[in-house]
């Protein structure tokens, strides 16, 4: 992991500036999108929400819309209505000023794990499946439906709305039986649901890009540093968001809602544990798997005691994020590298959960998880850049050391160079060669005794034969460093190399930096 070996103060000023300003840009981007998301909801068309209803339980099927309000039944908020194995009737009366509501066709958007028949002012206006006293007689309805409401049925005062419901195919009671009952303009129920999830497509794109980026980064990193937890984390959250948004993409029977919510809960547990494992492996030095097992067990126990499946889903990520905050906060106190940055990110995330726990899963969850992913990706990108720089520096140091060793060995025992001269072969000690000049397919070899030999090989081949004491200074010249006396830099960018023999060799502008490094 990056934080295992990378100290904050080992990052160069340029890299630190880059990472800091990139993070500021991401933060601005996230909060700007949050503001846009808020405006999308605030500027939406007018609605009338049903909040309080009267609930009557029908044991024998004797209730009707006409006699519903004559019964003495329980009054509860809509989200507190509980399903039973029998029929349920719910209803309320309300005032509706239609001209101020909308001038478009009117509809009733109803979202519930139930089949239902809908009545307005005593008239049946539509149905979603067929409610029944028994499971065999019930025809299962869809989770989200919109019922057309004729405007001529609407009264300004005392509209009576009644719904006959049954939920024999519901698999568990951990989630709300009824989610919404809204009088609004008539349109597809998927369009209404999707409008609520529309801002979440932005973090979906961020998560997808983060997944691809973190996969590429993991492939580039060394085996010791490679981190596959980030791409797994991005994939799990992206899948959770896709399952969440699927409600606005497809219409499904209400019994599938439980399966969908359980899938979201499972993905939330997995992504939370992935985040927890990432933090433990990054900051905990000893007993990592023991810490992970204890933290995971604690999380699962708390999730088990959650009241609703929505609460369980939030806790499945909230508890690991809180543990991560404690770990990074403690390591910040101990001056661990990068711990303060991670602790700050987890603190912001935890505050976001506490500030709006009910709306957290709809919008904020995915924005702030995307923010966490971007933050971690920046840290690992900087870490990879530093690791690559350190690796290149180590390679350069190794090459310089090897070069110095080769030069020392050459000084102690000069190598013999085989030369193919006209009519004969001669072996010349390398320490006698002053410089080599290219002459098309031949080279001219100048020796310290003043002789000039013509060797029938090209300069490139000759360069490979010469030991480390020789230096390429020009495309046509190779010099023995033992004979170099001085280097003069010219205004053109090149230079002149003066030898102890009195010869002067040109140094090309392209090779000049390498020559200066070698001579230093």
Image (cartoon, helix red, strand yellow):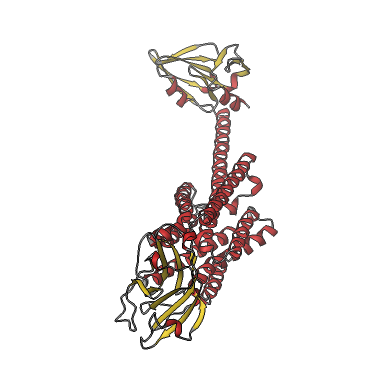
Observer-nearest of 245 and 84: 84
For the point 39% across and 62% down, the residue is 189
Observer-nearest of 269 and 192: 192
Residue 39 shows up from this direction? yes
Where 354 falls versus 402 (above or below)?
A: below
Horizontal relation, residue 399 to residue 113: left or right: right
Q: Quadrant of the C terminus?
A: top right
Horizontal relation, residue 182 to residue 320: left or right: left
Give the x, y percent position of residue 456.
40, 16
- Number of numbered labels in the structure image: 0
Observer-nearest of 218 and 222: 218
Where 194 falls versus 455 (above or below)?
A: below
Give the x, y percent position of residue 203.
49, 53
Where 257 falls versus 225 (above or below)?
A: below
Residue 1 shows up from this direction? no
For the point 43% across and 67% down, the residue is 154
């Amino acid at each position: 992991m990056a934080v295992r070996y990378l100290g904050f103060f080992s990052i160069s000023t340029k890299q630190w500036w880059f990472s800091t300003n990139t993070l500021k840009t991401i933060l601005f981007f996230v909060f700007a999108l949050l503001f846009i998301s808020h405006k999308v909801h605030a500027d939406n068309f007018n609605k009338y929400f049903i909040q309080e209803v009267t609930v009557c339980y029908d044991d024998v099927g004797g209730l009707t819309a006409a006699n519903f309000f004559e019964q003495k039944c329980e009054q509860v908020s809509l989200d507190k209505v509980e399903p039973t194995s029998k029929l349920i009737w719910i209803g309320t009366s309300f005032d509706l000023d239609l001209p101020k509501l909308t001038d478009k066709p009117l509809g009733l958007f109803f979202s519930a794990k139930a089949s239902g028949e809908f009545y307005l002012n005593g008239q049946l206006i539509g149905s979603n499946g067929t409610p029944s006293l028994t499971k065999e007689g019930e025809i299962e309805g869809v989770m989200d439906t919109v019922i057309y409401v004729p405007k001529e049925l609407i009264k300004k005062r005392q509209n009576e709305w009644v719904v006959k419901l049954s939920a024999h195919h519901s698999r568990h009671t951990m989630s709300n039986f009824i989610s919404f009952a809204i009088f609004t303009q008539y349109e597809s129920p998927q369009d209404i649901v999707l409008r609520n999830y529309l801002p979440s497509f932005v973090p979906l794109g961020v998560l997808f890009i983060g997944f691809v980026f973190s996969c590429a980064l993991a492939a580039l990193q060394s085996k010791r540093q490679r981190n596959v937890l980030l791409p797994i984390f991005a994939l799990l959250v992206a899948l959770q968001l896709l399952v969440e948004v699927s409600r606005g993409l497809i219409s499904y029977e209400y019994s599938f809602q439980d399966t969908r919510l359980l899938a979201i809960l499972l993905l939330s547990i997995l992504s939370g544990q992935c985040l927890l494992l990432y933090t433990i492996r990054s900051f905990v030095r000893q007993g990592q798997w023991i810490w992970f097992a204890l933290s995971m067990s604690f999380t699962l126990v708390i999730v088990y005691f959650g009241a609703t499946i929505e609460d369980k889903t939030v806790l499945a990520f909230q508890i690991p994020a809180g543990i991560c905050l404690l770990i990074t906060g403690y390591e910040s106190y101990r001056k661990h590298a990068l711990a303060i940055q991670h602790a700050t990110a987890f603190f912001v995330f935890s505050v976001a959960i506490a500030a709006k726990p009910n709306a957290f899963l709809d919008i904020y969850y995915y924005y702030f998880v995307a923010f966490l992913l971007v933050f971690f990706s920046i840290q690992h990108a900087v870490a990879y850049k530093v690791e690559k720089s350190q690796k290149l520096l180590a390679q350069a140091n190794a090459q310089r050391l090897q070069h110095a060793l080769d030069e020392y060995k050459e000084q102690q025992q000069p190598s013999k160079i085989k030369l193919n001269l006209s009519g004969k072969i001669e072996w010349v000690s390398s320490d006698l060669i002053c410089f080599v000049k290219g002459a098309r397919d031949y080279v001219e070899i100048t020796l310290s005794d003043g002789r000039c030999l013509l060797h029938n090989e090209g300069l490139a081949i000759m360069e490979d034969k010469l030991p480390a004491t020789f230096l390429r200074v020009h495309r046509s010249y190779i010099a023995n460093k033992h004979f170099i006396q001085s280097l003069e830099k010219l205004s053109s960018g090149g230079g002149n190399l003066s030898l102890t023999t009195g010869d002067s060799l040109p140094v090309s502008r392209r090779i000049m930096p390498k020559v200066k490094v070698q001579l230093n």
